Image (cartoon, grey):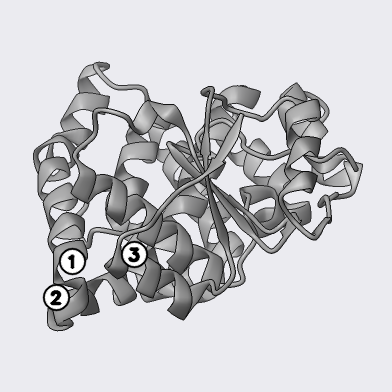
Amino acid sequence: MFETRDLSSPVEAVRDEHAPGALVIDCERDFETLPPAQAEDLGLLVDGLDPVSYPDAWLPADAPTLLARYASSDLTIGMPGDGSVVWTRQTDPPIVLVKPRVEGSPEPFIEFLLAEAFVELGLETPEHFLGFFEERYVDLDRAVERGPNSTYQIAAALYDGWLGLQTRETFATWHDRTDRAALGDSWQDAGTRLEDRVGELSRAVARGDTDFADATELACAAIKHAIELPAPFGALDTDAYRHHGPEYAIRWAEKTFDALAE
C-alpha cells in the first residue's frame, strides 16, 4: 500500500527548510479518505500516531458523515477536496502522501505539489478547515444555506485560499533562487493555466454554467498563484483575510449569499 518516494534535490531542499524529517509516501491505491485499517498501517512507518479530534458542538446537525468522523477520535487521514498530494501531522514525523492519480501529470507540476505540501506543513496551521473555523463552522453553515455538501466544499475552498495567501510569498521567492527556479516556473505555469477559467467565473455563475461552490473552489485555488480574481472572490485576496481568517471568511459568505439571494 505504501512505498517511500524519492525526491529531487530541489524538492528535498524545500522539505529540509520547511518540514525537516517529513516522510513522503507513494500510495498504491487512490483514496479520498484512507480506510481505517490502512491509516493505522502508517504506524509501521512512523514513531507514533496522534489523531486529531474536535468537539461535536463545532458541527452542524447535518454535517457530512466523513466530517463527523474526522472530528471524532478516529485516525482520519485525507478528506474530500484534499487533492492529489495530502499531508498530515497526525503522525510523528509528519507524512506527505502521494496518490496514484498524479500519474500522467507533468513531472514539474508534481514537484510543485510536493514542495507546496512541505511549505504548508511548515506553517504550523491546521491540516483541515475544521481546525481553522472551529466553533464558527456552524456560523458559516448558516451563512451559506446551500446544504451540507456545498458548505463543506466552500469551507474547504476558503481555507485553501487563506493558506494560499501565506504560501505564495514563499513560492514567489523561488524564481530568485537558482536551486528552485524550476519550482518557481511550475508555480507560475500552473497559475497561467488557471487565468482564463478564473476570469470567466463571475459570468459562468451568472449564466448558471458553474455552481457557486465550484466557482469558490477554483477562485480560492488561484489565490496561491497571485491571479487577479473577479467579484465577489477578489475580496478574499486581501491582507484583511490573511489577518482575520475565519471571521473575515464568514462575513464574506454572509454578504455574498445575501447578494445572491436578491
**Secondary element at tag 1:** helix
Q: Is residue 60 above or below residue 253?
A: above
| Quadrant housing the N terminus | top right
Marks 1 and 2 sit apart, C-alpha to C-alpha, by 5 Å
Marks 1 and 3 sit apart, C-alpha to C-alpha, by 12 Å
- Find residue 184 and name its label: 1
What amino acid does circle 1 point to?
A: Gly
- Find residue 175 and name its label: 2
Marks 3 and 2 sit apart, C-alpha to C-alpha, by 14 Å
Dot 1: few (<14), some (14–19), or many (≥20) neighbours within 10 Å? many
Is the residue under label 2 in contact with that under label 1 (CB below 8 Å)?
yes
Which comes sooner in the sequence, label 3 or label 2? 3
Q: Position of residue 232 (x, y in %)?
A: 31, 47
**Is label 1 or label 3 in front?**
3
Name the residue at 54% across, 27% down. 150
What amino acid does circle 2 point to?
A: His
**Which image quadrant is residue 80 in?**
top right
Is the residue under label 2 in contact with that under label 3 (CB below 8 Å)?
no
Is the residue under label 3 in contact with that under label 1 (CB below 8 Å)?
no
Drawn side of residue 108 relative to residue 237, left or right: left
- Find residue 45 and name its label: none
What amino acid does circle 3 point to?
A: Val
Dot 3 corresponds to which residue?
Answer: 11
Q: Where is residue 22 in the image (x, y as percent from the top left)?
A: 58, 64
Drawn side of residue 115 relative to residue 138, left or right: left
Name the residue at 30% across, 60% down. 8
Name the residue at 67% across, 55% down. 133
Dot 3: few (<14), some (14–19), or many (≥20) neighbours within 10 Å? many
| Quadrant housing the C terminus | top left
**Is label 3 or label 2 in front?**
3
